[in-house]
Image: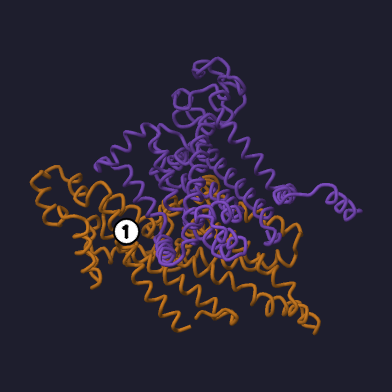
Amino acid sequence: MPWPIRASATTRERPVSAWGLAWSRFRRHRLALLGGAVILVLALSSALAPWISPYDPARSNLRLRFSAPSLRPPEDPRALPRCSRERSFVGWPCGVHPFGTDDLGRDLLTRVLYGGRVSLLVGFAAALGSTLFGGLLGAAVAYAGGAVDALMTRFTDAMLSIPQFPLLLILSGLLASRELPWAVRLSEALGPAKSILLIIVVITALSWMPAFRLVRGEILSLKEREFALASKAVGASAARIVLRHLLPNALHVLIVQSTLMVGEAILIESGLSFLGLGIQPPAVSWGNMLSRAQEFLYYPNGIYLALFPGLFIFLTVLCFNFLGDGLRDALDPRLGRRA
Amino acid sequence: MLAFLMRRLLLAIPTLFLISVVVYALLALKPGDPIDELRFGNPGFTHADYERLIKLYGLDKPWYIRYWYWLSRAVRGDFGPSRRYGMPAAEFVFRQRMPNTLLLSGLSLLVAFAVAVPAGVWCALRRHSFVDYAVTTLNFVGISVPVFWLGILLIYVFSVRLGWLPAGSLGTPGVAEQGLGAYVVDRLRHLVLPVLALSSIQMATWTRFMRSSMLEVIHDEYIRTARAKGLPERAVVLKHALRNAILPIITLVALAIPGVFSGAVLTETVFNWPGMGRAIYDAILANDFNVAMVALMFISLWIILCNILADVAYALADPRIRYD
């Protein structure tokens, strides 16, 4: 195959930008592409859940508890659920339960779709928050140097030395308080979305440290380079040097970190919700769907209550890990192809 | 090296102090107090009793005063009583819970290490083979699967469906009377599923690291030299390549050791295993401050020590690395 000739021909015709090069490397990473596509489908179908599912995720139907996954409507007409509309915009017909129903006769696929809204939202928001916070703090501290840098690095080390999960438990208990005046005011202001916002804050507060360390390391070496000195010499302000010149060069680290962090945040959310400390009903998340699933393992068809929400967590996290891996290979060619 | 060690050990003291302040403050600010447990369990409990106990335990004082009391006794090794379990907090944590967690988490770590090293080496040596692709994909599965969900599935398959293994707890009550052999077998049967679930993440991470570390080493010149002078492949891989490739894994293992003490609250919850993770979780929910503090401080100490250990082990294993 005469590939060197073609390659040289294209480079002569059209110069390729750094991002173009990264894209062409990324495109070759099939699992990452697949991961991205699956995430897109999951995000879209969760966002459009009310138009896809004919059911209300919270309405129970006690005549139809623990029904098996099936593509046919139940034989007994009394067991037919009341649908929120006769037939949804796109989606499946009323009376059919593709994933079966749970202990209260609620449609599992509907709940998984609605749960995806919360779980994905928490994942994206917490990942964005922690990388932005950690990244900006790391950049500022590294550029400032001196005592500020030493103090913040010490603090980060201390944060990393506290066992994470207990801290998560304490923090979520603290923010959910009914006795602290500021916590009560906060929860009144937030309304029904309270537990969702709280968990985003809690996860962000405890996972900015890796981004901080990564970006601090990058900026420490970048700020000694000639272009940084040059912009300092022409009189650019510290904020401008950090934001315009240094951070864009550390962007690849942030992108990879935030992608992997989405999966991580979804796992943390599901763990906390499984323990009953995360997303509170009536809000649905994949984690809180699992919190009582273990009780029903010995029931006929009880396994589906655990199987489907967990499968969606697993699939989503897997796809984000594929995506993060592909992005790392594409954005940081110095690392070479390792995994 | 010695100076580095001393400096790091001395720095551990202010770090531990900082952690204890943060954790104590957060615990104290959390709603509820240790009296709740007594109040809810006793219908004859009056408000006067409540006031009296609050005064008696010093809970009417601000948190920094209480912290000072706690600290001045803790440095003398007195961590106070557990209100929930009616025994000294340190005794409850170290005698009752620590052994269970050491058994479960320690065994998981060993299993993960014993699987990851050979698997990583194998994949690196047969790069791009079917086995390599299968293991690499499995690694992604291992780091992506929620541990508690894996636990639930394992229980469903091996306990509910097949009935081969017990679904949880430490062991069958009363089995010790049937002799030592039966006892050991019973305990081991109860360990299989939790160990499988708990070791999955570390197994995946370490296999991945081992593979990439081996790949970096295997193309080096000294490996070619070893092959060129006619050493058998076995000796080349085990003596020359593996010894260099295993360095990064030593660091990872050292950093995973604190997990052996902290336990895993999710796995312990799914398998109803009375370990440290569950103890900390229960202590926080029940406002059993003394138990939570002694457990968390002990684990933090281990995290700090193992961080130092990782650096030292790395320097000892690789003479090129120096700390001054």
Residue B77 higher or lower than A54, as above or below? below
Q: Chain of mark 1?
A: B
Quarter of the figure with the C terminus of chain A = bottom right
Residue underneath mark 1: B22
What residue type is disc 1 on?
Val
Question: Extreme left residue here?
Answer: B48
Task: Output the letter for the chain in orange.
Answer: B
**Residue A182 location (% of width, % of height):** 28, 41
Q: Residue at x 76, y 49 (%)?
A: A16
Residue A86 higher or lower than A244, as above or below? above
**Residue B89 location (% of width, % of height):** 26, 63
**Residue A98 location (% of width, % of height):** 59, 29
Task: Output the letter for the chain in purple.
Answer: A
**Residue A201 location (% of width, % of height):** 41, 45
> Is residue B178 visible to us here?
no
| Residue A10 located left or right of residue A259 | right
Question: Extreme front residue here?
Answer: A234
